Amino acid sequence: MNIEERKGIVIQIIDSETIKVSVINEEQGVIIIKLQSDVSGENDNFTTGLAYNSVTPVITTPVGDNFTIELPTSNTDIEQNKTFQITPICKNNSTVITSPILTYVVSDATICSVDSLGLVTAIKVGSTAITVKYENVEAILNVNVTEAITIVGYEIWANATTNYDYINLSSLRTWKVVESATLLEPLDKTFTFRLSQSDLNPSITPQQLITLLDNQTTTKIRLTANASIKGSFYLIASVDGVDVSRLVRIKGLTDL
């Protein structure tokens, strides 16, 4: 197929037939081409003046931008002093956009902050909203900052200036539960005390070593040692489903 353009007229040779382009103009972005041929076909419509065409023309219309932002969730809870990563998915006409440039705006910056990469840091208890923007669209993430969960550790200490790990034969000693961080007694807690076997002396039971358990307060217990049997046992204090243990030994007065 040869195409020759002379003085605005295109001559096209198709199957040895010469077809002249008689009119070329543009209306609202659509190019209209009218062809003129001296040869008619058996399927041409002489009433309308339209030539038969076995191929249906396809007109493609440009598609405009249609941006969207999708968030995995529209609501999230963040513990105080913790972080949360926002992971938006941006699309244009259902096509995912890689590395979109996003803008994050938080309504109340005293409750949480958000950086340029969408990392949220919880500051204080409360609720706010973060607006995620891309091009001409936006999405909202509702943020609820909850109170930080404090895990308190406990230890069992001797109720004395020195944190002894023993009781002498025929002697008594008071033990107390303290918070690991402050070494203060948690007076708002009520502990349950019990004795447990030590594998250091599997044939000697705690009941042989201790003759009396006397609860002093909700955090203290006094133990009385037997007069002749030496050995070790565990003193266990329980509260809120948590067990705290301390290995205690019964020894002679001159033993190290």
Image: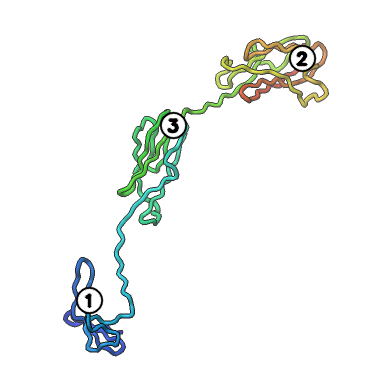
Q: Residue 54's spot in the image, x, y percent?
A: 33, 80
Q: Which one is closest to the eye, mark 3 or mark 1?
A: 1
Q: Which one is closest to the eye, mark 2 or mark 1?
A: 1
Q: Residue 14's spot in the image, x, y percent?
A: 29, 86
| CA neighbours of label 1 inside 10 A, class few (<14), some (14 to 19), many (20+) | few
Write the residue at 23% across / 71% down.
31
Q: Residue 138's spot in the image, x, y percent?
A: 34, 45
Q: Can residue 232 be seen in this view?
A: yes
Q: In front here: 110 or 160?
A: 110
Q: Mark 3 points at which residue?
A: 145
| CA neighbours of label 2 inside 10 A, class few (<14), some (14 to 19), many (20+) | many
Q: What residue type is labelled 1?
A: Ile
Identify the secondary structure beneath mark 1. Answer: strand
Write the residue at 26% across / 84% down.
12
As drawn, which residue projects farthest toward the left? Answer: 7
Write the residue at 18% across / 78% down.
23
Q: Which amino acid does label 3 sit on?
A: Val
Work out whether mark 3 precedes mark 1 in sequence or the reverse, and give the earlier one.
1
Residue 217 drawn above or below residue 95: above
Work out whether mark 3 precedes mark 2 in sequence or the reverse, and give the earlier one.
3
Write the residue at 30% across / 58% down.
64
Q: Name the residue under label 1.
A: 33
In the image: residue 84, left or right of residue 233 = left
Residue 190 drawn above or below residue 95: above
Using the image, tell me which numbered label, if any, was put on residue 235. Answer: none
Q: What residue type is labelled 2?
A: Ile
Q: Residue 117's spot in the image, x, y percent?
A: 39, 43
Work out whether mark 2 precedes mark 1 in sequence or the reverse, and give the earlier one.
1
**Residue 92 falls in image quadrant:** bottom left
In the image: residue 23, left or right of residue 234 = left
